[in-house]
Image (cartoon, coloured by chain):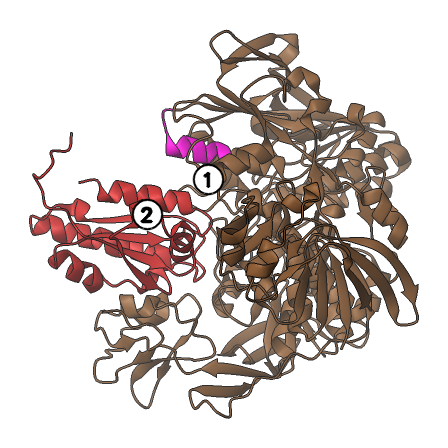
Chain colours: A red, B brown
């Protein structure tokens, strides 16, 4: 059970691949779940660097990296590269004693706006 | 300017229209519905964390591109009233059925939707495709009430009237029919309870639900899919495989299991068709993920008290069984679209025995699911292929719009070499060369064997296709440098070496099957299935075999090609030599036009079909070859003695030449076939811009599929090279000299082969024409030496 007031509301930064999640976010625009979420558009999930994620975590935000499903990357394997990077970040967070759940990665396609809302809902849940 | 009329704005129509429009053709797309896009609008994404390659996202992107293209005009809610041939081609008259929004003028501002008192204007926004459309069922004007609020509210005057006020006279040099299909009405099989029993859905309804929600009903539902509803059913007069139902049902089954691993999903099927490039892996995944495959056709579906459904089926060897499920999805097959007969009359088109259009009427082309059941990705391929056909038939390869670099210093103009190198002189290679020749190119064909022909036969066809084409036999590619637009290939042909400059390369090298089965064939009794009929005929009459076995699916899951070859061979052996023929297979793969009827013909002619499971053993004994396997239908072991055995080579090895793939820098998939298993690339693209693929090297074996592949590949080459110049923006990845340690991580991780080494500056550089601006190298560079000006993220 969520105890109100126990934990300050965490900011959520979502890295969105232009070819999938960004399109889904456009379709889902206006959904209350997306309110207050900061979207960062990237040409491919493979563009997201480790430092981009760490910088946002350092600033107190939670990070969600959204990529195209595996084997559906327009640039072949950008999503797989990011998956490795996110795992690396998780390891760094673990080593530093920070909750590794602060960074997540999900896969969804451009035609799945409902799934986008769903993963953001889950990412917002503390 | 040439004009083409496309009937149907589904994915096939849009894919073809885009290719034609890109060549400077003016395209009118006629659509009878209020919105464009056709059936894909109601389909869901079927990815788990892994893409299932259903193609829905790719199709949305294509349709959105078509909507934005200045050379394509969409005429929504319009129907063809008349069409006649005139001196110039066709004169058609289309009539607006009800008020509709003209996409070309619409700015998607939404003013009409706000103004409509009946709330009949809906916004569709998914996968980058945004469109407003009028739902005529709700429109006040349908009830003859005066209302023009949307018309008045529209600032772009994008809303058109109805009836004669909205008639359009269209002229066209060619007509493309891409009217799509209609799903089987499952009420035609009343015992399955559709529309009578709650929670019995059809495939399209299930798609529409999963397009908007995570589950069909509840997360814990026990879901069953029933295959072949309205397909492979001679009693309904639908004696053909719909080719897509196995794909959509198993994909949805995986999605449901993925979203709630505790839920049960069962698929009742006759045969599982091979619908994926790496199907062998897919089947293992289905088993690992717990999707239950039950080989039977349910005989009735009845409601139970409490809302569950009872599914009765005839089991193996007559044993009946009953199972309970919460939701049943009937995988309805494809049939001809409503109005197909009328359209065929108007255009003089022939239809096959099931009502699908046949090509062959001059000036009228058919593509997509109105010609035969096809998946989305195959429809895209057929759309691209038919575009090439139209360009050839009109003898006008078109002229793409020229872009200017004059006022933008960031643009660079790169000359494209007009040469094309085709690797492989088999069915695919000869086709590609023939198509390219017709489009005005002078391709060079490399064949590693002493003669062209590959695995295919028809010599006359080859001569026609390869006439006036530069063919090098005994030739291999030894080195390849350069990139899209200017490749330099070093070729060894016989004893001579030659350098070839080309703008594009098409790989049609087939699979490396010459090595496959060496351990297996003894070329006396066990031989490749394709050689079987001829080998039997060569024997003296007294030595001819009494029984002949044909084995499919031995090591790799068979495709349509294997089935076609096996049953054609079986029929020939029976008709000419009156031998007993046994065909061993795991599944009857009939997902292409004419194959189900071929299968029926073979069975009627007396071919014994043994569906086996588990391993199949071949043992050469004195009197012949003993084939032992477990009969899946009878649940018994079967041992059959055959004097000669043919093994389908397609079922042995799917791998392409790994050395060639490495030399070209083209990725292979998990089964070693060329081309990544990525829907964005299908049909013809590779990970390297400028290198295209067709045919068996990318796992297309069935001749009609290979031909479509070859045409689509030729179209892609034409689409690239007809521009003469490549205009590239200099926004590609840049490398800082002082930081670059030349570790080549970027070169290894760039999927497109864009990174090379600048020897003078001692650093990596990206080629602007190859770089796709994805930024993968930027994220990978350990020295953080790479920047991507096109996308700066803080």
User: Could you tell me residue B616's position as x and y percent?
Assistant: 59, 29
Numbered disc in front, either 1 or 2: 1
Q: In which quarter of the image is the N terminus of chain B?
A: bottom right
Specify start and end residues of the magenta stretch as a single range.
B252-262
| Subunit that carries the residue with mark 1 | B
Main structural element of the magenta stretch: helix, strand or loop? helix
User: Could you tell me residue B109's position as x and y percent?
Assistant: 49, 61
Q: SS of the residue at dot 2?
A: strand
Residue at which label 1 appears: B212
Asked whether disc 1 touches disc 2, contact meaning CB atoms under 8 Å apart, the reply is no
Label 1 environment density (alpha carbons within 10 Å; few <14, some 14–19, many ≥20): some
Q: Does the magenta stretch include residue B261?
A: yes
Foreground: B535 or B459? B459
What is the distance, in whole Å, between disc 1 and disc 2 at their CAs? 18 Å
User: Could you tell me residue B42's position as x and y percent?
Assistant: 56, 42
| Subunit that carries the residue with mark 2 | A
Residue B246 relative to residue B252: left or right? right
Q: Can residue A119 be seen in this view?
A: yes
Foreground: B541 or B579? B579
Residue at which label 2 appears: A106
Same subunit, labels 1 and 2: the answer reads: no
Q: Can residue B709 be seen in this view?
A: no
């Amino acid at each position: 059970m969520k105890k109100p007031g126990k934990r300050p509301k965490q900011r959520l930064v979502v890295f969105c691949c232009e070819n999938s999640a960004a399109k889904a976010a456009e379709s889902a625009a206006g959904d209350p779940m997306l309110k207050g979420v900061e979207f960062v558009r990237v040409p491919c999930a493979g563009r997201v660097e480790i430092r981009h994620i760490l910088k946002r975590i350092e600033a107190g935000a939670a990070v969600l990296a959204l990529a195209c499903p595996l084997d559906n990357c327009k640039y072949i394997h950008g999503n797989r590269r990011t998956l490795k990077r996110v795992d690396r970040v998780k390891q760094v967070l673990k080593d530093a004693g920070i909750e590794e759940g602060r960074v997540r990665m999900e896969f969804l396609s451009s035609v799945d706006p409902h799934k986008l809302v769903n993963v953001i809902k889950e990412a917002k849940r503390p | 300017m040439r004009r083409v009329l496309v009937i149907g704005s589904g994915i096939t129509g849009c894919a073809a229209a885009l290719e034609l429009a890109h060549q400077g053709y003016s395209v009118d797309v006629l659509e009878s519905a209020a919105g464009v896009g056709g059936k894909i609008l109601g389909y869901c994404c079927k990815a788990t964390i892994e893409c299932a390659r259903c193609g829905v996202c790719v199709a949305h992107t294509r349709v959105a591109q078509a909507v934005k293209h200045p050379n394509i005009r969409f005429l929504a809610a319009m129907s063809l009233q008349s069409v006649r041939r005139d001196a110039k081609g066709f004169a058609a008259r289309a009539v607006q059925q009800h008020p509709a929004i003209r996409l070309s003028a619409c700015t998607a501002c939404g003013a009409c939707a706000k103004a409509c008192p009946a709330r009949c204007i809906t916004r569709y926004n998914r996968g980058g495709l945004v469109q407003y459309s009028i739902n005529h069922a709700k429109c006040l004007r349908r009830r003859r009430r005066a209302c023009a609020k949307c018309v008045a509210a529209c600032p772009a005057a994008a809303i058109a009237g109805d009836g004669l006020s909205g008639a359009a006279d269209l002229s066209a040099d060619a007509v493309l029919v891409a009217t799509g299909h209609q799903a089987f009405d499952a009420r035609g099989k009343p015992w399955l309870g559709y529309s009578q029993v709650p929670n019995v859905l059809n495939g399209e309804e299930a798609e529409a639900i999963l397009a908007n929600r995570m589950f069909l009903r509840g997360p814990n539902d026990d879901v069953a899919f029933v295959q072949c509803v309205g397909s492979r059913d001679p009693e309904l007069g639908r004696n053909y495989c719909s080719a897509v139902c196995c794909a959509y049902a198993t994909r949805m089954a995986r999605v449901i299991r993925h979203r709630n691993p505790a839920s049960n999903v069962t698929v009742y099927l006759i045969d599982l068709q091979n619908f994926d490039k790496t199907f062998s892996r897919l089947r293992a995944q289905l088993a690992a993920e717990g999707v239950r495959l039950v080989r039977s056709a349910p005989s009735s579906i009845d409601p139970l008290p409490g809302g569950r459904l009872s599914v009765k089926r005839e089991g193996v060897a007559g044993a009946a069984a009953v199972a309970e499920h919460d939701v049943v999805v009937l995988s309805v097959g494809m049939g001809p679209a409503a109005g197909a007969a009328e359209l065929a009359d108007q255009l003089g088109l022939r239809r096959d025995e099931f009502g699908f259009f046949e090509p062959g009427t001059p000036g009228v082309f058919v593509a997509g699911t109105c010609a035969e059941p096809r998946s989305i990705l195959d429809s895209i391929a057929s759309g691209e292929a038919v575009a090439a056909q139209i360009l050839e038939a009109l003898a006008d390869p078109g002229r793409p719009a020229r872009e200017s670099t004059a006022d933008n210093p960031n643009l660079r103009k790169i000359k494209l070499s007009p040469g094309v190198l085709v690797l492989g002189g088999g069915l695919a290679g000869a086709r590609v060369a023939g198509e390219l020749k017709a489009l005005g190119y002078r391709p060079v064909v490399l064949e590693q064997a002493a003669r062209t022909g590959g695995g295919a036969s028809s010599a006359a066809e080859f001569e026609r296709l390869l006439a006036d084409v530069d063919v090098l036999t005994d030739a291999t590619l030894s080195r390849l440098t350069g990139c899209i637009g200017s490749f330099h290939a070093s070729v060894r042909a016989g004893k001579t070496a030659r350098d070839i400059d080309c703008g594009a390369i098409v790989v049609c090298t087939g699979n490396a099957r010459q090595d496959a089965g060496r351990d297996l064939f003894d070329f006396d009794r066990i031989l490749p299935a394709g050689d079987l009929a001829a080998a039997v005929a060569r024997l003296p009459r007294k030595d001819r075999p009494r029984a002949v076995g044909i084995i499919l699916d031995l090591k790799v899951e068979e495709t349509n090609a294997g089935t076609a070859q096996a049953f054609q061979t079986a029929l020939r052996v029976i008709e000419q030599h009156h031998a007993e023929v046994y065909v061993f297979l795991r599944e009857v793969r009939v997902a292409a036009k004419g194959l189900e009827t071929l299968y029926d013909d073979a069975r009627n002619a007396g071919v014994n079909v043994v569906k086996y499971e588990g391993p199949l053993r071949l043992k050469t004994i004195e009197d012949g070859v003993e084939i032992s396997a477990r009969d899946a239908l009878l649940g018994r072991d079967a041992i059959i003695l055959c004097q000669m055995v043919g093994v389908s080579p397609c079922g042995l090895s799917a791998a392409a030449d790994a050395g060639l793939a490495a030399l070209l820098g083209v990725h292979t998939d998990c089964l070693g076939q060329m081309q990544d298993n990525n829907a964005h690339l299908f049909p013809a693209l590779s990970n390297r811009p400028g290198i295209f693929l067709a045919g068996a090297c990318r796992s297309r074996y069935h001749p009609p599929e290979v031909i479509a592949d070859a045409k689509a590949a030729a179209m892609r080459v034409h689409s690239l090279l007809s521009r003469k110049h490549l205009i590239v923006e200099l926004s590609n990845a840049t490398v800082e000299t002082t930081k670059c340690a030349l570790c080549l991580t970027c070169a290894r991780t760039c999927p497109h082969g864009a990174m090379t080494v600048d020897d003078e500056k001692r650093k990596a550089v990206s080629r602007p024409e190859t770089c796709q601006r994805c930024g993968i190298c930027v994220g990978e560079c350990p020295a953080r030496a790479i920047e991507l000006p096109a996308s700066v993220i803080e």
